[in-house]
Image (tube, rainbow, N blue to C red):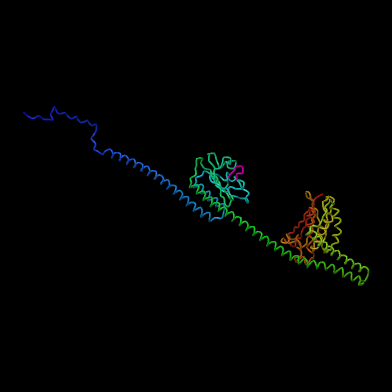
Amino acid sequence: MSAANPSSSGPNPTPPPPKASSGPKQAPGTQPQRVQSTETVAELMQAQRQLTHAMNEARELRTKLGRRSHQMQVLQQVSEILAATSKGGQVVSVVLDVLAQEFHCHRAVVWTLEDGGAGYLPKDATGLTRPQWSPMQLPAPNPFPSTPLVLFQSQWLDPSCDDATLGVLRGTDGSQLFFIPFEHQLLLLGFAILALPADRRWEEEDLDSITILQRQAAISLYNAWLFRDLSQQRDALQRQAIELERVNDALREADQLKSEFLALTSHELRTPLTGILGFTRLVMDGLYDDAEEMRSMLQDSYTSGQHLLGLLNDILDLAKIESGKLEVHPEPFCLATLLDEVKPIAEAYPRRKDVELFWPVDMSAIPEVVVDPNRLKQVLLNLLSNALKFTKEGSVAVQVERHPGLVALLVVDTGIGVSLESQARLFQKFAQAEGGHSREFGGTGLGLVISKHLMEMMGGTISLSSEGLGHGSTLRISMPIA
């Protein structure tokens, strides 16, 4: 009998079939590797985005750096130009060129402080014609008195500042106005106003460049202002020096003339006084043959006394004129009557035998004039005395002319005349005391000076005309009709 197999108590069980797989078979550890690859790709993409962003930032920085470098070069050149000029107009032109080229404004105008600080005047502009910008004058110290404004700060101007003055600058294209002041030591020396597009926004580097340009322009304008002020002071000092030199020359000349006048006056006073004393002594000593000779001596003594009195009166009248105490009393007076009173006195004046004295024939049509009769008589007698004294041959004529509102008396002589150089000084004090003819003919040289003052005080005039030496002269006095 065979032994039985303990493991085969029945048929052997069949193992279950393996499960069908829906994909390829994966080795152990594959899933973690896939996750790691995904993370790497994400990191690379993030790094690429950061690199692109960094490249964009670097490009922008290079652009800004290039623009800043360009602006710094421009400002450096501008600084060199402004440092080399002392004229405000050149400063304005340079600043305006920089604003127009570097900041691309449509229109711009630059004002500077003028008229001794009374207002701001437009000096130059771009984008506008001269007839458009030249009337844009603004007041000082605040060019916009109706609008609160921080004058020393760059800013956009409110539309309320856009009045009739700035309307042309703003234009019709919707531009905004930007205010750039040029301030130095709290003094607004000038400013620029730019017309920029409405969407324009300032970059930081632009504002920095404008700030630098403001400082340079303000300092240059201040230096130009000082230079101009110093130039004006220098010119004023030069004019004053020239005027002082002229005054000194006049004073030296007046002092010389005064010295000559004193010497001549002492001679002129001594001559008639000597005659008076001499004739009086002869009469007192009985040194005459008969009563007729004694009367002639007394007449000569009286004539010398009259001459001496006239000299003293001239000196006293001049002293009154210089002290402002000489008075006249104008009143309506008949000129014909005055000529009748003057005629016998002038006829008695000494003159050469070949000199004739002529008077107006018909004086009935001569109107009344407003004068001081005594003073006019003094003037006319002085003119006649001079004319007779300086006329060696020919005639002396008194003529009357009537003009609208006035009457003119002319004393025309054929005497020695007056040189063109001397005519301008003839009415100055002591002018005749310079020698030449004055020594030959005598006199103190005060008569015409006194006559000029008297005629002016009576509302009249006196003038002289002569073609030169040897051609006679004409003295004209005019006075208002009553």
Q: Is residue 192 left or right of residue 397?
A: left
What is the residue that sits farthest to the left in this orientation? Answer: 1
Relative vertical location of residue 295 with respect to residue 154 in this rendering, above or below: below
Residue at the location (84% across, 65% down)?
A: 308
Q: Main secondary structure of the magenta part?
A: loop
405 or 213, nearer to the observer: 213
Quadrant for the N terminus in the image: top left
**What percent of the width, then of the height, locates residue 268?**
81, 67
What segment is highlighted magenta in the picture? Answer: 143-149
In the image, residue 146 lies in the stretch drawn in magenta: yes
What is the residue that sits farthest to the top in this orientation? Answer: 10
**What percent of the width, then of the height, locates residue 402?**
79, 51
318 or 213, nearer to the observer: 213
Q: Is residue 362 visible?
A: no
**What percent of the width, then of the height, locates residue 398?**
81, 56
What is the residue that sits farthest to the right in this orientation? Answer: 291
Q: Quadrant of residue 136?
A: top right
Q: Quadrant of residue 409?
A: bottom right
**What percent of the width, then of the height, locates residue 247?**
70, 61
Q: Is residue 282 left or right of residue 191?
A: right
In the image, residue 198 lies in the stretch drawn in magenta: no
